[in-house]
Image (spheres, rainbow, N blue to C red):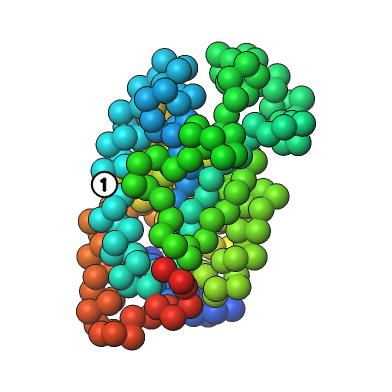
């Protein structure tokens, strides 16, 4: 009863219709699926993370789960946004002294003697089949936060997006940082429980706990696929949002 009472109070205070249920939050007409950093340096054998000696199998397993989610999103008309890192470039326009000092302490040559996500190089390319379809939006970032110094917020607001659904790597770094940034920009924030991955299981779980407590919700790929499939079936050939994206 207390929940229902508080929800009614919140509805009275809100400036727009409140999106209380998951179905309301992820309705295709106002939702973007944001895919973060699914690049060779973070997912592939021979990339930065594998050269660090970390276990990349969670990222590679994740890559096998994502196509089903992408298909459901595209068919329903959800806006697809792919985010990539670009760190190493000629003349070093992006790596600050603070970033480089952190790298020296923790990254075993990454960002210094080992280039990271070079533009036009294999390391910065998408991992396997996890890549945008023709016409889908690509945002390039130079920090963990996909909003920092990019046009992501402009793109989302231009498309009438109210909810961001976050997938990709790494759960406890770029996904979490972007989720926090989305929430403080007043987007409903959804981090897909099995749609992101970390190299250490506890890091992944801790981030999901933190998201649920302070920033958003953490449904599964199965949950979202079911809702987007139902939304498409209910709307027939006029799925909400289908005309706004070049998906």
Q: Position of residue 92 (x, y in %)?
A: 74, 31
Compared with 71, 176 (above or below) is above
Looking at the rendered structure, the secondary structure element under dot 1 is: helix
Residue 181 seen in this snapshot: no
Q: Quadrant of residue 217?
A: bottom left
Residue 246 seen in this snapshot: yes
Q: Quadrant of residue 77?
A: bottom left
In depth, the one of 245 and 160 nearer the eye is: 245
Q: Is 176 positioned to the left or the right of 198 in the image?
A: right
Compared with 230, 39 (above or below) is above
Compared with 144, 156 (above or below) is below
Q: Is 17 positioned to the left or the right of 55 in the image?
A: right
Q: Position of residue 171 (x, y in %)?
A: 43, 39
Task: Look at 27% across and 36% down and name the residue there.
Answer: 61
Q: Quadrant of residue 3?
A: bottom left
In the rendered view of the protein, which quadrant contains the N terminus? bottom left
Q: Is 136 positioned to the left or the right of 26 in the image?
A: right
In depth, the one of 199 and 176 nearer the eye is: 199
**Disc 1: which residue:** 65
Compared with 28, 150 (above or below) is above
Task: Look at 39% across and 40% down and name the residue there.
Answer: 127
Task: Look at 48% across and 34% down and name the residue there.
Answer: 122
Task: Look at 60% across and 70% down and name the residue there.
Answer: 157
Q: Residues within 10 Å of mark 1 (few under 14, many from 20)?
A: some
Q: Position of residue 143 (x, y in %)?
A: 63, 40
């Amino acid at each position: 009863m207390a929940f229902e009472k508080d929800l009614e109070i919140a509805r009275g205070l809100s400036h727009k219709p409140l999106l209380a249920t998951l179905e309301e939050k992820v309705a295709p007409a106002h939702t973007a699926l944001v895919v973060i950093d699914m690049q060779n340096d973070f997912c592939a054998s021979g990339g930065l993370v594998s050269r660090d000696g970390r276990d990349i199998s969670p990222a590679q397993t994740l890559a096998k789960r994502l196509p089903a989610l992408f298909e459901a999103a595209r068919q329903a008309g959800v806006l697809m946004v792919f985010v990539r890192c670009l760190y190493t470039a000629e003349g070093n326009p992006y790596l600050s002294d603070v970033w480089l000092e952190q790298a020296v302490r923790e990254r075993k040559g990454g960002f210094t003697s080992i280039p990271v996500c070079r533009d036009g190089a294999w390391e910065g390319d998408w991992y396997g089949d996890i890549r945008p379809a023709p016409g889908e939006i690509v945002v390039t970032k130079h920090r963990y936060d996909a909003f920092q110094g990019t046009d992501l917020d402009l793109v989302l607001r231009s498309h009438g997006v109210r909810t961001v659904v976050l997938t990709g790597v790494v759960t406890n770094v770029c996904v979490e940082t972007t989720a926090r940034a989305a929430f403080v920009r007043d987007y409903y924030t959804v981090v897909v429980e099995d749609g992101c991955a970390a190299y250490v299981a506890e890091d992944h779980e801790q981030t999901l706990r933190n998201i649920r407590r302070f920033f958003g919700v953490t449904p599964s790929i199965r949950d979202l696929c079911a809702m987007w499939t139902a939304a498409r079936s209910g709307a027939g050939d006029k799925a909400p949002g289908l005309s706004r994206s070049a998906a």
